[in-house]
Image: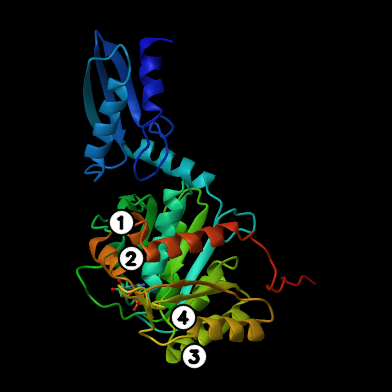
Amino acid sequence: MSNSEVLLEALRTVNDPELRRPITELDMVQSAQLDGQKARVTILLTIAGCPMRSTIEAEVTAALLGVAEVEDVDVTLGVMDPQQRAALRERLASRRTPFSDPQSLTRVIAVASGKGGVGKSSITANLAAHLASQGLKVGLIDADVHGFSIPSLMGITQNPTRMDDMILPPVAHGVKVISIGMFLDSNQPVIWRGPMLHRALEQFLSDVYFGDLDYLFLDLPPGTGDMAISVSQLLPNSELLVITTPQSTATEVAERAGTIALQTDQKVLGVVENMSFLQLPDGTRMEVFGSGGGENLSESLTRQLGYEVNLLSQIPLEESVRVGSDQGTPVVLGAAQSPAALALQELAEKLVQRPRGLAGRSLPMSF
Ligand SMILES: Nc1ncnc2c1ncn2[C@@H]1O[C@H](COP(=O)(O)OP(=O)(O)OP(=O)(O)O)[C@@H](O)[C@H]1O
Protein backbone atom coordinates (compact mmCIF):
# COMPACT_ATOMS: atom_id res chain seq x y z
CA MET A 1 0.00 0.00 0.00
CA SER A 2 1.22 3.51 -0.78
CA ASN A 3 1.42 6.04 2.03
CA SER A 4 -1.81 7.74 0.93
CA GLU A 5 -3.60 4.42 0.80
CA VAL A 6 -2.54 3.70 4.37
CA LEU A 7 -3.99 7.05 5.45
CA LEU A 8 -7.20 6.46 3.48
CA GLU A 9 -7.55 3.06 5.10
CA ALA A 10 -7.40 4.74 8.52
CA LEU A 11 -9.90 7.40 7.42
CA ARG A 12 -12.36 4.70 6.40
CA THR A 13 -13.04 4.25 10.12
CA VAL A 14 -14.25 7.83 10.50
CA ASN A 15 -17.98 8.33 10.00
CA ASP A 16 -19.62 11.63 9.22
CA PRO A 17 -21.58 12.17 12.46
CA GLU A 18 -24.77 13.18 10.67
CA LEU A 19 -24.73 10.93 7.64
CA ARG A 20 -23.25 8.05 9.62
CA ARG A 21 -21.19 6.74 6.75
CA PRO A 22 -17.42 6.68 6.31
CA ILE A 23 -16.08 10.03 5.13
CA THR A 24 -14.11 8.20 2.46
CA GLU A 25 -17.37 6.88 0.97
CA LEU A 26 -18.90 10.34 1.00
CA ASP A 27 -16.01 11.81 -1.01
CA MET A 28 -15.17 14.09 1.88
CA VAL A 29 -11.45 13.30 1.77
CA GLN A 30 -9.98 15.60 -0.84
CA SER A 31 -6.36 14.67 -0.22
CA ALA A 32 -4.28 12.61 2.19
CA GLN A 33 -0.50 12.59 2.09
CA LEU A 34 2.30 11.60 4.38
CA ASP A 35 5.00 14.24 4.58
CA GLY A 36 7.80 12.65 6.61
CA GLN A 37 5.92 11.61 9.73
CA LYS A 38 3.26 14.26 9.31
CA ALA A 39 -0.09 13.30 7.80
CA ARG A 40 -1.58 16.18 5.82
CA VAL A 41 -5.23 15.77 4.94
CA THR A 42 -7.91 17.99 3.48
CA ILE A 43 -11.46 17.14 4.46
CA LEU A 44 -14.41 18.68 2.65
CA LEU A 45 -17.38 19.43 4.88
CA THR A 46 -20.82 19.20 3.33
CA ILE A 47 -21.69 22.79 4.21
CA ALA A 48 -19.86 25.85 5.49
CA GLY A 49 -20.36 26.24 9.23
CA CYS A 50 -21.01 22.51 9.66
CA PRO A 51 -21.88 22.12 13.37
CA MET A 52 -19.91 18.89 13.46
CA ARG A 53 -16.63 20.34 12.17
CA SER A 54 -14.73 19.98 15.45
CA THR A 55 -15.99 16.41 15.96
CA ILE A 56 -14.89 15.47 12.44
CA GLU A 57 -11.50 17.13 12.90
CA ALA A 58 -10.92 15.34 16.21
CA GLU A 59 -11.92 11.95 14.82
CA VAL A 60 -9.79 12.36 11.70
CA THR A 61 -6.80 13.31 13.86
CA ALA A 62 -7.30 10.38 16.20
CA ALA A 63 -7.68 7.91 13.31
CA LEU A 64 -4.50 9.13 11.62
CA LEU A 65 -2.48 9.09 14.85
CA GLY A 66 -3.34 5.40 15.01
CA VAL A 67 -1.22 4.80 11.89
CA ALA A 68 2.26 3.56 12.83
CA GLU A 69 4.11 5.93 10.46
CA VAL A 70 2.24 9.04 11.68
CA GLU A 71 3.59 11.27 14.47
CA ASP A 72 1.73 14.45 13.69
CA VAL A 73 -1.45 15.43 11.83
CA ASP A 74 -2.38 18.54 9.90
CA VAL A 75 -6.10 18.69 9.04
CA THR A 76 -7.38 21.33 6.63
CA LEU A 77 -11.16 21.70 6.58
CA GLY A 78 -12.67 22.85 3.29
CA VAL A 79 -16.23 22.91 2.00
CA MET A 80 -17.79 21.00 -0.90
CA ASP A 81 -18.66 23.10 -3.91
CA PRO A 82 -22.27 23.02 -5.18
CA GLN A 83 -21.50 20.31 -7.76
CA GLN A 84 -19.84 18.06 -5.22
CA ARG A 85 -22.75 18.58 -2.84
CA ALA A 86 -25.31 17.86 -5.55
CA ALA A 87 -23.49 14.64 -6.47
CA LEU A 88 -23.46 13.56 -2.83
CA ARG A 89 -27.14 14.40 -2.38
CA GLU A 90 -28.05 12.43 -5.45
CA ARG A 91 -26.04 9.45 -4.29
CA LEU A 92 -27.68 9.49 -0.87
CA ALA A 93 -31.16 9.93 -2.35
CA SER A 94 -30.69 7.10 -4.83
CA ARG A 95 -29.85 4.73 -2.00
CA ARG A 96 -32.90 5.16 0.10
CA THR A 97 -36.00 3.05 -0.04
CA PRO A 98 -38.95 5.16 1.09
CA PHE A 99 -40.33 3.98 4.42
CA SER A 100 -43.74 3.70 2.76
CA ASP A 101 -42.43 1.21 0.21
CA PRO A 102 -43.68 -2.33 0.91
CA GLN A 103 -40.10 -3.48 0.26
CA SER A 104 -38.73 -1.25 3.02
CA LEU A 105 -37.14 -3.28 5.79
CA THR A 106 -37.57 -0.49 8.32
CA ARG A 107 -40.11 -1.19 11.03
CA VAL A 108 -42.16 1.89 11.70
CA ILE A 109 -43.67 2.14 15.16
CA ALA A 110 -46.04 5.00 15.97
CA VAL A 111 -46.52 5.60 19.67
CA ALA A 112 -50.00 6.82 20.58
CA SER A 113 -51.93 7.73 23.70
CA GLY A 114 -55.42 8.95 24.45
CA LYS A 115 -54.39 11.93 26.49
CA GLY A 116 -51.29 13.96 27.20
CA GLY A 117 -48.87 13.52 30.06
CA VAL A 118 -49.03 9.72 30.25
CA GLY A 119 -45.36 9.39 29.30
CA LYS A 120 -45.73 8.64 25.59
CA SER A 121 -42.77 10.80 24.56
CA SER A 122 -40.56 9.51 27.39
CA ILE A 123 -41.29 5.91 26.43
CA THR A 124 -40.65 6.61 22.74
CA ALA A 125 -37.31 8.30 23.50
CA ASN A 126 -36.26 5.42 25.76
CA LEU A 127 -37.20 2.71 23.27
CA ALA A 128 -35.29 4.49 20.52
CA ALA A 129 -32.23 5.10 22.70
CA HIS A 130 -32.12 1.54 23.97
CA LEU A 131 -32.37 -0.03 20.52
CA ALA A 132 -29.66 2.33 19.22
CA SER A 133 -27.44 1.33 22.15
CA GLN A 134 -27.85 -2.27 20.98
CA GLY A 135 -26.35 -1.38 17.63
CA LEU A 136 -29.59 -0.98 15.67
CA LYS A 137 -30.09 1.94 13.31
CA VAL A 138 -32.88 4.01 14.73
CA GLY A 139 -34.71 7.19 13.71
CA LEU A 140 -37.25 9.17 15.67
CA ILE A 141 -39.80 11.63 14.32
CA ASP A 142 -41.40 13.90 16.86
CA ALA A 143 -44.82 14.14 15.26
CA ASP A 144 -46.33 15.56 18.45
CA VAL A 145 -46.46 18.93 16.79
CA HIS A 146 -48.34 20.69 19.54
CA GLY A 147 -46.22 19.42 22.40
CA PHE A 148 -42.87 18.60 20.86
CA SER A 149 -40.72 17.42 23.72
CA ILE A 150 -38.47 14.86 22.05
CA PRO A 151 -35.51 17.23 21.44
CA SER A 152 -35.25 18.08 25.12
CA LEU A 153 -35.84 14.46 26.22
CA MET A 154 -32.96 13.45 23.96
CA GLY A 155 -30.80 16.40 25.03
CA ILE A 156 -30.69 18.01 21.58
CA THR A 157 -29.98 21.70 21.27
CA GLN A 158 -28.46 21.55 17.81
CA ASN A 159 -30.51 22.39 14.74
CA PRO A 160 -30.66 20.08 11.74
CA THR A 161 -28.09 20.79 9.05
CA ARG A 162 -29.48 21.73 5.68
CA MET A 163 -27.68 20.47 2.63
CA ASP A 164 -29.65 22.38 -0.01
CA ASP A 165 -33.07 20.68 0.07
CA MET A 166 -31.87 17.72 2.11
CA ILE A 167 -32.14 17.92 5.89
CA LEU A 168 -29.60 16.08 8.02
CA PRO A 169 -31.16 15.31 11.38
CA PRO A 170 -29.16 15.73 14.59
CA VAL A 171 -28.04 12.49 16.19
CA ALA A 172 -28.49 12.01 19.93
CA HIS A 173 -27.64 8.85 21.86
CA GLY A 174 -27.19 7.17 18.48
CA VAL A 175 -30.69 8.10 17.28
CA LYS A 176 -31.41 10.35 14.30
CA VAL A 177 -34.04 12.78 15.53
CA ILE A 178 -36.24 15.29 13.77
CA SER A 179 -38.92 17.51 15.30
CA ILE A 180 -41.11 20.38 14.22
CA GLY A 181 -39.68 22.17 17.25
CA MET A 182 -36.33 22.35 15.46
CA PHE A 183 -37.83 24.56 12.76
CA LEU A 184 -39.61 27.09 14.95
CA ASP A 185 -38.36 30.17 16.73
CA SER A 186 -38.27 29.78 20.49
CA ASN A 187 -41.34 28.24 22.09
CA GLN A 188 -43.98 29.55 19.71
CA PRO A 189 -47.15 27.45 19.64
CA VAL A 190 -48.08 25.52 16.52
CA ILE A 191 -51.59 26.35 15.38
CA TRP A 192 -51.72 24.20 12.31
CA ARG A 193 -54.60 22.53 10.63
CA GLY A 194 -54.69 19.02 9.24
CA PRO A 195 -53.28 19.71 5.76
CA MET A 196 -50.28 21.54 7.19
CA LEU A 197 -49.55 18.71 9.60
CA HIS A 198 -49.83 16.26 6.72
CA ARG A 199 -47.44 18.34 4.65
CA ALA A 200 -44.96 18.61 7.55
CA LEU A 201 -44.88 14.85 8.01
CA GLU A 202 -44.62 14.31 4.27
CA GLN A 203 -41.66 16.67 4.18
CA PHE A 204 -39.97 14.91 7.08
CA LEU A 205 -40.32 11.62 5.25
CA SER A 206 -39.05 12.94 1.94
CA ASP A 207 -36.45 15.58 2.83
CA VAL A 208 -34.85 14.27 6.00
CA TYR A 209 -31.93 11.97 5.39
CA PHE A 210 -32.38 9.05 7.76
CA GLY A 211 -30.40 6.57 5.69
CA ASP A 212 -31.18 2.90 6.18
CA LEU A 213 -32.99 2.37 9.44
CA ASP A 214 -33.93 -0.75 11.32
CA TYR A 215 -36.56 1.15 13.34
CA LEU A 216 -38.35 4.42 12.87
CA PHE A 217 -40.35 5.65 15.85
CA LEU A 218 -43.01 8.33 15.66
CA ASP A 219 -44.14 10.17 18.74
CA LEU A 220 -47.77 10.98 17.86
CA PRO A 221 -49.77 13.79 19.41
CA PRO A 222 -52.18 12.54 22.09
CA GLY A 223 -55.68 11.63 20.90
CA THR A 224 -57.07 10.60 17.58
CA GLY A 225 -56.29 13.65 15.53
CA ASP A 226 -55.23 14.45 12.00
CA MET A 227 -51.63 13.38 12.53
CA ALA A 228 -52.65 9.80 13.32
CA ILE A 229 -54.57 9.66 10.02
CA SER A 230 -51.64 11.21 8.12
CA VAL A 231 -49.24 8.65 9.58
CA SER A 232 -51.46 5.80 8.46
CA GLN A 233 -51.77 7.28 4.96
CA LEU A 234 -48.09 8.15 4.51
CA LEU A 235 -46.74 5.09 6.32
CA PRO A 236 -49.27 2.32 5.72
CA ASN A 237 -46.88 -0.26 7.18
CA SER A 238 -46.64 1.54 10.49
CA GLU A 239 -47.72 -0.27 13.64
CA LEU A 240 -49.18 1.32 16.76
CA LEU A 241 -48.06 1.07 20.35
CA VAL A 242 -50.65 2.47 22.75
CA ILE A 243 -49.60 4.03 26.05
CA THR A 244 -51.90 4.49 29.00
CA THR A 245 -51.73 4.99 32.75
CA PRO A 246 -53.62 2.69 35.15
CA GLN A 247 -56.41 5.24 35.56
CA SER A 248 -59.76 4.35 34.06
CA THR A 249 -60.24 7.82 32.54
CA ALA A 250 -56.90 7.49 30.73
CA THR A 251 -57.85 4.05 29.50
CA GLU A 252 -61.14 5.14 27.99
CA VAL A 253 -59.49 7.76 25.81
CA ALA A 254 -56.57 5.46 25.01
CA GLU A 255 -59.10 2.97 23.71
CA ARG A 256 -60.22 5.49 21.10
CA ALA A 257 -56.59 6.06 20.09
CA GLY A 258 -56.20 2.29 19.70
CA THR A 259 -59.40 1.61 17.82
CA ILE A 260 -58.46 4.21 15.22
CA ALA A 261 -56.40 1.29 13.90
CA LEU A 262 -59.69 -0.25 12.73
CA GLN A 263 -60.21 2.62 10.34
CA THR A 264 -56.60 2.96 9.29
CA ASP A 265 -55.79 -0.76 8.93
CA GLN A 266 -52.77 -0.42 11.17
CA LYS A 267 -51.68 -3.20 13.44
CA VAL A 268 -51.68 -2.50 17.17
CA LEU A 269 -48.53 -4.03 18.62
CA GLY A 270 -49.69 -3.86 22.18
CA VAL A 271 -50.43 -1.75 25.21
CA VAL A 272 -47.96 -0.22 27.65
CA GLU A 273 -49.09 0.88 31.09
CA ASN A 274 -46.91 3.67 32.43
CA MET A 275 -46.68 5.00 35.99
CA SER A 276 -48.16 1.68 37.11
CA PHE A 277 -46.94 1.87 40.70
CA LEU A 278 -44.48 3.58 42.99
CA GLN A 279 -42.10 1.27 44.77
CA LEU A 280 -41.84 2.40 48.39
CA PRO A 281 -38.65 2.00 50.45
CA ASP A 282 -40.24 -0.87 52.44
CA GLY A 283 -40.80 -2.79 49.20
CA THR A 284 -44.55 -2.26 48.96
CA ARG A 285 -46.11 -0.88 45.81
CA MET A 286 -48.25 2.20 45.96
CA GLU A 287 -50.73 2.42 43.09
CA VAL A 288 -50.75 6.19 42.78
CA PHE A 289 -52.96 6.21 39.68
CA GLY A 290 -55.11 3.21 40.52
CA SER A 291 -54.76 -0.12 38.82
CA GLY A 292 -56.03 -2.26 35.98
CA GLY A 293 -55.97 0.34 33.19
CA GLY A 294 -53.46 -1.47 31.01
CA GLU A 295 -55.16 -4.82 31.47
CA ASN A 296 -58.60 -3.39 30.66
CA LEU A 297 -57.29 -1.61 27.60
CA SER A 298 -55.59 -4.76 26.34
CA GLU A 299 -58.80 -6.74 26.77
CA SER A 300 -61.03 -4.21 25.10
CA LEU A 301 -58.67 -3.67 22.15
CA THR A 302 -58.38 -7.44 21.73
CA ARG A 303 -62.18 -7.62 21.59
CA GLN A 304 -62.62 -4.73 19.22
CA LEU A 305 -59.74 -5.41 16.86
CA GLY A 306 -60.30 -9.15 16.73
CA TYR A 307 -56.73 -10.22 17.52
CA GLU A 308 -54.58 -10.46 20.63
CA VAL A 309 -53.44 -7.02 21.83
CA ASN A 310 -51.26 -7.78 24.82
CA LEU A 311 -50.28 -5.65 27.77
CA LEU A 312 -46.57 -5.63 26.97
CA SER A 313 -45.21 -3.78 29.97
CA GLN A 314 -46.00 -2.03 33.24
CA ILE A 315 -43.50 0.70 33.90
CA PRO A 316 -43.13 2.01 37.45
CA LEU A 317 -43.42 5.62 38.42
CA GLU A 318 -39.85 6.52 39.24
CA GLU A 319 -37.87 9.66 39.86
CA SER A 320 -35.05 8.49 37.59
CA VAL A 321 -37.39 8.63 34.56
CA ARG A 322 -38.24 12.25 35.25
CA VAL A 323 -34.60 13.13 35.98
CA GLY A 324 -33.51 11.47 32.74
CA SER A 325 -36.14 13.45 30.81
CA ASP A 326 -35.04 16.71 32.40
CA GLN A 327 -31.37 16.03 31.74
CA GLY A 328 -31.83 14.84 28.17
CA THR A 329 -30.45 11.37 28.92
CA PRO A 330 -33.11 8.65 28.66
CA VAL A 331 -33.25 6.55 31.81
CA VAL A 332 -32.31 3.38 29.89
CA LEU A 333 -28.90 4.99 29.47
CA GLY A 334 -28.60 7.25 32.51
CA ALA A 335 -29.80 4.81 35.19
CA ALA A 336 -29.80 1.59 33.20
CA GLN A 337 -30.23 -0.65 36.26
CA SER A 338 -33.26 1.13 37.72
CA PRO A 339 -36.53 -0.85 37.66
CA ALA A 340 -38.12 1.55 35.15
CA ALA A 341 -35.09 1.30 32.85
CA LEU A 342 -35.14 -2.48 33.05
CA ALA A 343 -38.86 -2.51 32.20
CA LEU A 344 -38.26 -0.22 29.23
CA GLN A 345 -35.35 -2.33 27.99
CA GLU A 346 -37.45 -5.46 28.25
CA LEU A 347 -40.26 -3.74 26.34
CA ALA A 348 -37.82 -2.77 23.57
CA GLU A 349 -36.55 -6.34 23.35
CA LYS A 350 -40.14 -7.61 23.04
CA LEU A 351 -40.78 -5.25 20.15
CA VAL A 352 -37.63 -6.40 18.39
CA GLN A 353 -38.50 -10.06 18.82
CA ARG A 354 -41.90 -9.58 17.25
CA PRO A 355 -41.69 -10.56 13.63
CA ARG A 356 -43.05 -8.07 11.22
CA GLY A 357 -46.31 -9.61 10.14
CA LEU A 358 -49.64 -9.00 8.60
CA ALA A 359 -51.67 -10.74 11.29
CA GLY A 360 -54.59 -8.55 12.16
CA ARG A 361 -54.18 -6.29 9.18
CA SER A 362 -56.56 -6.45 6.31
CA LEU A 363 -54.74 -7.07 3.09
CA PRO A 364 -55.18 -4.55 0.29
CA MET A 365 -57.69 -5.81 -2.27
CA SER A 366 -56.83 -5.78 -5.91
CA PHE A 367 -59.49 -6.13 -8.56
N1 LIG B 1 -42.59 6.22 34.61
C1 LIG B 1 -42.40 7.49 34.94
N2 LIG B 1 -41.95 7.85 36.15
C2 LIG B 1 -41.76 9.15 36.47
N3 LIG B 1 -41.98 10.18 35.64
C3 LIG B 1 -42.42 9.89 34.41
C4 LIG B 1 -42.65 8.54 33.98
N4 LIG B 1 -43.08 8.59 32.70
C5 LIG B 1 -43.12 9.88 32.33
N5 LIG B 1 -42.72 10.67 33.35
C6 LIG B 1 -42.65 12.14 33.39
O1 LIG B 1 -43.96 12.64 33.14
C7 LIG B 1 -43.92 13.82 32.35
C8 LIG B 1 -44.76 13.65 31.10
O2 LIG B 1 -44.17 12.66 30.27
P1 LIG B 1 -44.16 12.77 28.70
O3 LIG B 1 -43.82 14.14 28.23
O4 LIG B 1 -43.34 11.64 28.20
O5 LIG B 1 -45.70 12.50 28.43
P2 LIG B 1 -46.50 12.55 27.05
O6 LIG B 1 -47.56 11.52 27.19
O7 LIG B 1 -45.60 12.46 25.90
O8 LIG B 1 -47.16 13.97 27.11
P3 LIG B 1 -47.53 14.92 25.86
O9 LIG B 1 -48.17 14.07 24.84
O10 LIG B 1 -48.46 15.90 26.50
O11 LIG B 1 -46.24 15.49 25.40
C9 LIG B 1 -42.46 14.07 32.05
O12 LIG B 1 -41.94 15.00 32.95
C10 LIG B 1 -41.79 12.72 32.30
O13 LIG B 1 -40.47 12.85 32.73
Within-10-Å neighbours for mark 2: few <14, some 14–19, many 20+? many
Residue drawn at the location 33% of the way across and 61% of the way down: 331
Q: Amino acid at mark 4?
A: Asp
Q: Which residue is mark 1?
A: 334
Q: Position of residue 27 (x, y in %)?
A: 39, 31
Q: Quadrant of residue 26?
A: top left
Q: Quadrant of residue 37?
A: top left
Mark 3 or 1, which is nearer the eye?
1
Q: Label 3: state its secondary structure.
A: helix
Quadrant of the rendering where the C terminus is positioned = bottom right
Mark sitting earlier along the chain (3/2): 2
Q: Amino acid at mark 3?
A: Glu
Residue 294 in sight here: yes
Q: Which residue is mark 2?
A: 150
Q: Position of residue 31 (x, y in %)?
A: 32, 21
Which of the numbered marks, if any, corresponds to residue 39? none
Mark 4 or 3, which is nearer the eye?
3
Q: Which residue is mark 4?
A: 226
Q: Label 1: state its secondary structure.
A: helix
Label 3 – label 1 distance at C-alpha: 33 Å
- Horizontal side, residue 19 vs residue 61: left or right: right
Mark 2 or 4, which is nearer the eye?
2
Mark 2 or 1, which is nearer the eye?
1
The coloring applied to the image is: rainbow
Label 2 – label 4 distance at C-alpha: 20 Å
Mark sitting earlier along the chain (2/1): 2
Q: Quadrant of residue 259?
A: bottom right
Instruction: Decide: is 141 above or below 292.
Output: above
- Horizontal side, residue 160 vs residue 256: left or right: left
**For the image shown, how many numbered marks are present on the structure?**
4
Within-10-Å neighbours for mark 3: few <14, some 14–19, many 20+? some
Within-10-Å neighbours for mark 1: few <14, some 14–19, many 20+? some
